[in-house]
Amino acid sequence: MTGGKIACILSEGFEDSEFRVPYEKLKKEGFQVDVIGTKVGEELEGKGGKERVKTEKAIDGVKADDYQALLIPGGYSPDHLRADDRFVEFVTAFERSKKLIAAVCHGPQILMTAGLVKGRTLTAWSTIQGDLRLAGATVRDQAVVTDGNWVTSRKPEDLAQFSEAIVKSLR
């Protein structure tokens, strides 16, 4: 069993399965996954209404140094998060320390807002791919792309491969 702490940043309207599938895989592999939002105890609902998740930590009370990796589920959540400089700085701190960043679907939006995608190779939901290219990224339309400390994925159908790639990168 592996161990360590994973930060998962989340806001209202996250894609239900893009949170649940990697979250469960990481827990099964022995990782502690902290759900981080704007405040502790906030109940967030997935955009499909299948998941309700309570935040365990507030962004003001966490540091990237406390975690081994960052998970960014898609849906509407990344768009909400990237409007908050605290989350953008949190993501940037993971990149500065070259810790694993795993983002799926719309997750790379916050990487783009942080100015991190230029020169990187990644994937995302189809409508985000063009934005990433315009921001200077090389985009691959495939289930999972690993580029250095980044693991990215496109959509719910890719989640098994995405979750496996995260665990592989953490080992």
Image (tube, rainbow, N blue to C red):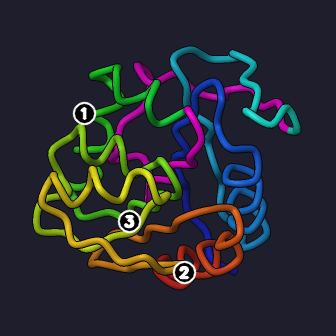
Spatial CA distance of label 2 from label 3 is 11 Å
Query: Residue 100 shows which numbered tag?
Result: 3
- Decide which of tag 2 and tag 3 comes sooner along the chain: 3
Residue 165 numbered mark, or none: 2
Q: Position of residue 138 (x, y in %)?
A: 21, 72
Q: Judge left or right: residue 153 versus residue 95.
A: right
Q: Where 98 sits versus 145, above or below?
A: above
Upstream in the sequence, badge 3 or badge 1? 1
Q: Is residue 4 left or right of residue 31?
A: left
Q: Residue at x 34, y 20 (%)?
A: 84
| Left or right: 147, with 66 as reference point | left
Q: Dot 2: within a 10 Å radius of its alpha carbon, few (fewer than 14), some, or many (20 or more) residues?
A: some
Asked if residue 159 can be seen in this view, the reply is yes
- Residue 136: percent from the left, percent from the top? 12, 60
- Residue drawn at x 34%, y 41% as measured from the top left: 110
Which class describes the residues within 10 Å of circle 3: few (<14), some (14-19), or many (20+)? many
Residue furthest to the right: 50
Q: Which residues are magenta?
A: 51-76
Q: Earlier in the sequence, mark 2 or mark 1?
A: 1
Q: Amino acid at mark 3?
A: Leu
